Image (cartoon, grey):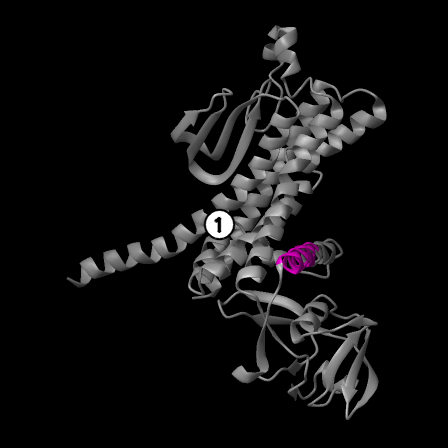
Amino acid sequence: MSFVNEIFGAGWSAAAYLVPFLFVLTLVIFFHELGHFLVARWTGVKVLAFSIGFGPELFGWDDRHGTRWRLAAIPLGGYVRFAGDENAAGAPDVDALERMSPEERRSSFFFAPLPARAAIVAAGPLANFLLAIAIFAGIFLTVGRPATDAVVDKVEPGSAAEAAGFQPGDLVVAIDGGKIATFGDMQRIVEQSADRTMKVTVERGGARVDLTATPRLRAITDAFGNKLRIGLLGISRATNPDSVRMERFGPLEALVAGAEETWFQVTRTGAYLGRLVVGRESADQIGGPIRIAKTSGDFATLGFVALLSLAAILSVSIGLLNLVPIPLLDGGHLLFYAIEALRGRPLGARAQEIGMRIGLALVLMLMIFATWNDIVHLSTLG
């Protein structure tokens, strides 16, 4: 009987991670590819296939425009294949292009005007950012956002905050001249400001006091066991329920707040990558499908709203990743188009082929590295 319970327990545990993972990843990939698809249709480029996943088709159907909508067996990506493409990576089918009639060429991606091709490619990452804005705005509109005043409850001994002169009861009102409305506002700035000296204005006893503080880069472990390195001052807020309020938003306010939240995720990811390039950040925070699956399961335990928030964050990450100018990614295609615009003609087929091979190698190395990071990360959780 215990063996049966273990089998069912293991199956339930796997499903608890797999189902949220597939939901989050499918949502993000679908909207990314939908961006490519809609702009292609708008510019008159024929779409042969819209696939969620790679590999053998599980099921699919053909729409009235001749597009094959398919769900494939390997749900770790997706693609939109245009008329004239040889494969899912967007490499041109030279033989097919030569055999095309003038009418077929008018609906081929390869023969589309440069602005149309650039718009189609850029629409994927743009759709990811719009999805994130929509999710955040929807959450703020329907649920709201919890917030607490930026009041210092405790100062950690020996911390950067103690060195700067923070005292319990201080109300942080500004950092470097920028208004601080909540403790979360302050946290976001501090987390991205490790080793950067900043001017913090606090209200103390009815007067305003300017402090000079330098957050220290420290490693922390979140509630799910994930290790992060962020800037910390060493102050804490009150944890009693009465200190938490729920911010409510109207439709326009929610949209603006959703855009601001999305931009924050963009800048935070960009700041991490910048620190990584100059050697001030470790690459062990780069995760792959295993860590995404684990995080999805963890967030699902907090509720559907938390899972949607994760989808928005992941959507921003995928949008940014695809803009990296590596051939095979959207950013690599946009790089080719920029070169074409400067030269007045596209790069030769051989140059593009070599670029695609280099891009494929880089993407594969990144996937292997991210998966290795995932395995090491999970093994350290015990």
Query: Does residue 255 show up magenta in the picture?
Result: yes
User: In this view, which residue lies farthest toward the bottom?
Assistant: 205
The image shows residue 153 at horizontal and vertical percentages of 64, 87
Q: Nearer the viewer, residue 180 or 64?
A: 64
The image shows residue 13 at horizontal and vertical percentages of 34, 58
> In what quadrant of the picture does the C terminus appear?
bottom left
Q: Which residues are magenta?
A: 251-266
> In what quadrant of the picture does the N terminus appear?
bottom left
**Is residue 46 depicted above or below 309 in this figure?**
above
Residue shown at 50%/58% (left/top)?
376
Q: For the residue marked with disc 1, what is the amino acid? A: Val
**Is residue 50 depicted above or below 255 in this figure?**
above
Residue placed under numbered mark 1 in the picture: 24
Residue shown at 60%/6% (left/top)?
99
The image shows residue 78 at horizontal and vertical percentages of 52, 36
**Is residue 35 depicted above or below 268 in this figure?**
above
Q: Main secondary structure of the magenta part?
A: helix
Work out whether residue 327 can be spotted: no
Count the labels in the image.
1
- Image-based side of 343 in relation to 82, left or right: right
Query: Does residue 213 show up magenta in the picture?
Result: no
Q: Secondary structure at mark 1?
A: helix
**Is residue 341 depicted above or below 155 in this figure?**
above
Residue shown at 62%/61% (left/top)?
250
Mark 1: few, some, or many residues within 10 Å (few <14, many ≥20)?
many
Work out whether residue 2 can be spotted: yes
Q: Nearer the viewer, residue 317 or 357?
A: 317
